[in-house]
Amino acid sequence: MSALSATEDNAVLAKLSLRLRIFLFFCLLGLGGLASVGLALWFGYARAIETTTANGFTFAAILAAFLILGLTVGIWLLFDENVAKPIERLASQMRSRAHAGVEGDLDTNAARYLGDLAPAASAVTRQLNDTALSTAQAIAHETARLTAEKARLTALLTEIPVATILVNPNGQIVLYDGQAAEVLAQLGVPRLNAQISEYFDAKSLGAAVNKLGRTGMDVAFTAHSPDGAQSFDTKLKPMEGGGYLMVIDSQTLEISPDAARPLVYDFDLLDQQRGAAEMDILDQPLRSLCFSVFDTETTGLLPHKDDVVQLGAVRVLNGRIVEGEQINQLVDPGRPIPPASTKVHKVTDAMVRGQPDIRTVGKRFHDFSREAVIVAHNAPFDMAFLHRHAKDTGVTWDHPILDTVLLSAVLFGASETHTLDALCARLNVTIPQVLRHTALGDARATAEVLVKMLPMLEARGLTSFGQVIEETRRHGRLLEDLN
C-alpha cells in the first residue's frame, strides 16, 4: 500500500512545472519557519508561566534558531538531491554525448522532478545522435578505405630491405615503419614526437642535415648510435615543406619474418610549430601534449612493501592513442605472489619467472614516458611503486602527472562514483573481460577514457594543462580518501 502511495505521489509531482516545484520548496521553507517560531514561542510562553521569569522567551529564541537551522538544512538536502545533483548529472551526460561521442539515451530517471528539462534534453541528444550517426557512417566508410591502403603500404615497406623514418623540420619523428622500429629499439624506445637525435649521434646527423639544407639533394652518410657502438648506412631525402626522410639499409638487421611490423605515424606532427615544446608545460594546450598512460598489477595494495608483477602502458598523442606504441611487460617481483592477488590479476609465479625486475622495466617505462605527461587512474598508488625503486633504477620521476579520478570529479561532480569501471560505463568504453585487471587492458581503458574526456574539458573552457591541474586540485581529497 505504501509503495502504491509513493508511486501516486511521484505521478502527481511529475505533472507540476519546474517553477512550481521550486516555489513549493520556498513555501515549505517559509511555512516551516513560521511553524518553528510559533512552536518555540508556545514552549517559551509555557516555560515563562512556570518560572514566572523572562527566561522562557530566551529559551524560545534559542529553540526557534535551532529549528529554523534544521529546517534550512533539511530543505537544502532535498533541493540538492532532487534539483542540483540531477541538473549536474544531466549536464555531464549531455557533454559526454556532445563532445566525447558517447551514444545512447540519457538517464532521465534522476531528473524526473525537473519538469520538462529532462525530456527536452533527451530530445536534443537524440537528434544529435541521429546526425552523428549519419556522419559516423560516412567516416567509417572512408576509414575502411584508408585502413586498406595503409595495410598495402605497410606490406610494401616490409618487402623493401630499408628502414624508413620521417622527420619534421623540428627534428621530431613523424613516421617510422616496422623495420625502423627494430633499429630504434636497439637505440632506445621507439616513440613518435621524439627527437631523432636521441637515437643517433647528433654530430654526424647534424652535419648531414646541414648539407641537405644547403644542397637540397639526397645525402648519404654513416649514422652512428650515441655511444658510437653501432653504425648504419643511411640516406637523407629532403621533403617538400621541410623535414626529411631517413632511409637506413636494414639488410644487416636480424628481423624475424613473423614479427608484427606496423606502420606508426601521426602526420599532424608535420605542422607542429617550432618552439611549442619550449612553452611552459602549464601554458601548453591539452591537444598538444603527449600522454603516457599506464597501470600496474601488484602483489598487494601496500606500495611500501608490495611489488609490481606487471606493467602496461600506451601513448596518447594529439588526442589519439598511438597504435603500435605500448608496453605489456610481466615483472619478476623477487618474491612469491599471494594467491589472493593472483585471483584478481591472473599473474602466477610461473609467468613471472625469468622476467626482468622492476628496475629494468621502470627504466624502460621512464624512456617510454620521456617528455610526456604520465596519466593513471589513482596515480599516487601506481607512482608510489616507481618512486620506491627510483634510486636503484637510476631515474628521476619528475614528470607532470594527471589522474583520471580527478578528471572524472571535475567533469561529473565529486559526488559521483569514480572507479575505472564506472568511468568506462559512463563514456561507453568497453574493457573486454579477459583484459580487465591486466596492466595493459586497464591502461588501454584509461587511455580511451582520457581521449574522450579531453574534448569535454576543452568544452568547459579548460584548454591548457595548467587550467586542468588547477581545477583538479579542488578534488585532491578524493585521492586521499581512496588511498
Image (spheres, rainbow, N blue to C red):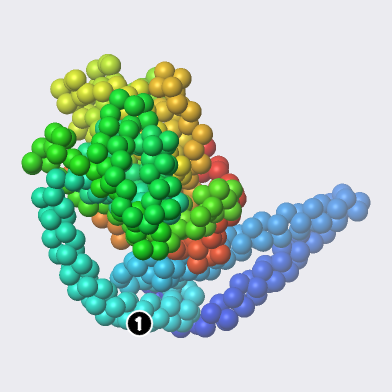
The one nearer the camera, 49 or 131, is 131
Q: Is residue 450 visible?
A: no
Is any atom of residue 202 visible in this view? Answer: yes
Q: Which of 259 and 215 is in front in this view?
A: 215
Image coordinates of residue 417 in percent, x first then y, are 42, 51
Above or below, 279 against 387 in this view is: below
Q: Nearer the viewer, residue 231 or 450?
A: 231
| 9 vs 334: above or below | below
Quadrant showing the N terminus: bottom left
Residue 121 found in image quarter: bottom left
Q: Name the residue beneath numbered marker 1.
A: 127
Q: Give the residue displayed 38% in from the left and 44% down from the top.
A: 208
**Disc 1 packing (10 Å; few <14; some 14–19; many ≥20):** few
- Residue at the far right: name it: 53
Q: What residue type is labelled 1?
A: Gln
- Residue ranking furthest to the front: 215
- Residue 68, located in which quarter of the rendered image? bottom right
